[in-house]
Image (cartoon, helix red, strand yellow):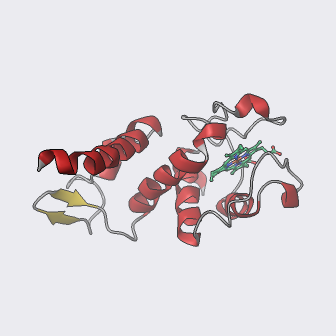
Amino acid sequence: MIKLHLPSRASLWCAVALSATVLGFGTATVWAEPDKTQTQVAHGANGALLPRDSKDAAVFRGGLVYANYCVTCHGINADGNGRAARLHTPRPANLRASDKNDAYIGLIVRKGGEPLGRSTGMPPWAEELTDEQIGDVVAFVRSVNAQSHSR
Ligand code: HEC
């Protein structure tokens, strides 16, 4: 019984652990605590869950998108130092230091660098990702971005 359930649970927890530890937001944002400002959090028997439409839920989902599609180039710390970064000139952007707004980030993720006069090294993702995934990954980039307080 336990053996049967282990692989799927293990991979789920890998994904959760990856996005929580690797992508720079603490478990407190994922599992909301009662003393936080998230007043609409549903508290179930298994602990608090985030409402689907909340910003924190979008950031969490976006972290998973990031881990799957962006980390190779932009890096585990979103600083542009992914394992494939050295293959690109110019190098993948440091997303923590980006001065671009959400609309621009959404656009470059959707269309890739080329139509925006940037490098083809930044691929277009509109075919791969749903609108929700793109919105989520933009929310994630915003959450790790130094400018996040001002937008
Ligand atoms: C194959 C490597 C690669 C992958 C994978 C990749 N990028 Fe990029 N990205 C780049 C490169 C290279 C640039 C810099 C383009 C330039 O400066 O002309 C860039 C630029 C960007 C920028 C512009 C930032 C700024 O401040 O101008 C954003 C935002 C971005 N990428 C987000 C993402 C997201 C989100 C994903 C995952 C969905 C992703 N990238 C996946 C290579 C990649």
Asked whether 71 or 12 is in front, the reply is 12
Q: Is residue 110 above or below residue 21?
A: below
**Rendered position, 40 above or below 82:** below
Where 127 sits versus 122, above or below? below
**Image-quadrant location for residue 74:** top right
For the question of whether residue 146 can be seen, the reply is no
Q: Nearer the viewer, residue 41 or 90?
A: 90
Residue 49: x %, y % from top left:
25, 61
The image quadrant of residue 125 is bottom right
Residue ID at (27%, 54%): 32
On the image, the x and y values in percent for residue 101 come to 68, 58
Asked whether residue 26 appears in the rendered view, the answer is yes
Residue 86 x %, y %: 75, 28
Write down the quadrant of residue 81 in the picture.
Answer: top right
Give percent across and percent down for residue 66.
54, 49
Report the number of discs: 0
Residue at x-position 62% and y-position 38%: 72
Nearest the camera: 52 or 96? 52
Residue shown at 35%/46% (left/top)?
Answer: 16
Looking at the rendered image, the quarter that the C terminus falls into is: bottom right
Q: In the picture provided, is 86 more to the left or to the right than 77?
A: right
Left or right position of 2 against 105: left
Residue drawn 57% across the image and 69% down it: 130
